[in-house]
Amino acid sequence: MTFDHDALFRHTYAQPEHAASLLRGVLPAPLVAAIDWSSLRLVPGTSIDETLEPRHADLLLCADAHGCAVLLYLLLEHKSTPERFTALQLLRYAVRVFDRFLHEHPDAARLPPIVPIVVHHGDRSWRAARTVLDLIDLDGLPPAAQKVLSPLQPNLHFLLDDLAAASESELRERSGTLLHRLTMLLLQFVRPARDDDPVRLVRRWRDLLAALWQHPGGRSGMYALFSYLASQLTAAPARLAAAGAQIHSDARTMGKTIADQLLEQGYQRGRDSGRIELLLRLLRTRFGSVTPDVEQRLRAASPEQIDVVAERLLTAESPADLFA
């Protein structure tokens, strides 16, 4: 049960109701007024880049605005130091969105507008460039040359929701759904409290959590939030049951279920780790050495993939054959 920042972000904001809460708070007022929020929908196959680095998660949504489709691209940035070239990375993603659009609409005469949005949580507020043009070095050129070159450069400007610049009370008081507000709070404030007791954290936001528990459809959101707590905190899993009891007597069972899953995952992870170490020893015995690439792929393998590698080890002529 690995439920990290990306998983929580996607769980919450892949649902249009909660995505609308986030978007209404970051989009300029004229665009908020122009969008038909009942039309907001997640674009299938929403991750634009399946090779996103571990500090990123992305979602692509679409909404109608006076008969025009508007694409809304959300990127979660959760590096402790904001990525200097995030604007450039977003430009790449925007081009991929347009490429996908043209592939799906080969007869289109024009492209839909896209709004790139970065949601940042981390140890300090955002300080990196928010446009590609700010990354291009024109300083050494004469002013006249800068004036000519500047509009010729590829550019993109993104909107920023900087959770690291907001206080806890500001995030609590944001407008929008309960799950939206709780997701923002947990993304920003759980990581610095990794060694804290989940009971103490739950008490900080007990009013919001209790309201979510009572809300129709709120149980799935609560399960996601507690799964995130279980994955991020170092406290004993059994403390999750006690944390759940702070919200509602029935929530104690939910906390215990997640705790049991966490313990089982730890047991399975230990078994898989032992099997991987054994396979590595066997590989070195048979082939003399193992390249870093093979070792990395083996350590990243699922239990099912480990079984396949173990079978192929009997007939493989080289370590590369294990993943053929």
Image (spheres, grey):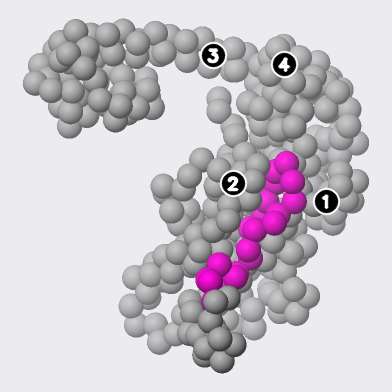
Q: Which mark is residue 112?
A: none
Residue position marked by numbered label 2 in the rendering: 10
The residue at which mark 4 appears reads as 235
Look at the magenta stretch and give its main secondary structure: loop
Q: Please give the name of the residue rendered at 77% of the width and 28% of the height, measured from the top-left corner.
A: 193
251 left or right of 203?
left
Point out the tag, 3 or 4, that comes first from the N-terminus: 4
Estimate the spatial distance between the alpha carbons at disc 3 and disc 2, rounded to whole Å. 24 Å
Magenta span covers which residues? 118-138
Residue marked by disc 3: 266
Residue flagged by tag 1: what amino acid is it?
Answer: Ala
Question: How dense is the environment of label 4, judged by Cα within 10 Å: few (below 14), some, or many (20 and up)?
Answer: some
Q: Quadrant of the C terminus?
A: top left
Residue 254 placement, left or right of 153: right
The earlier-in-sequence mark between 1 and 2 is 2
Q: Residue at x 59, y 32 (%)?
A: 3
Mark 1 vs mark 2, foreground winner is 1
Mark 3 / mark 2, whichever is N-terminal: 2
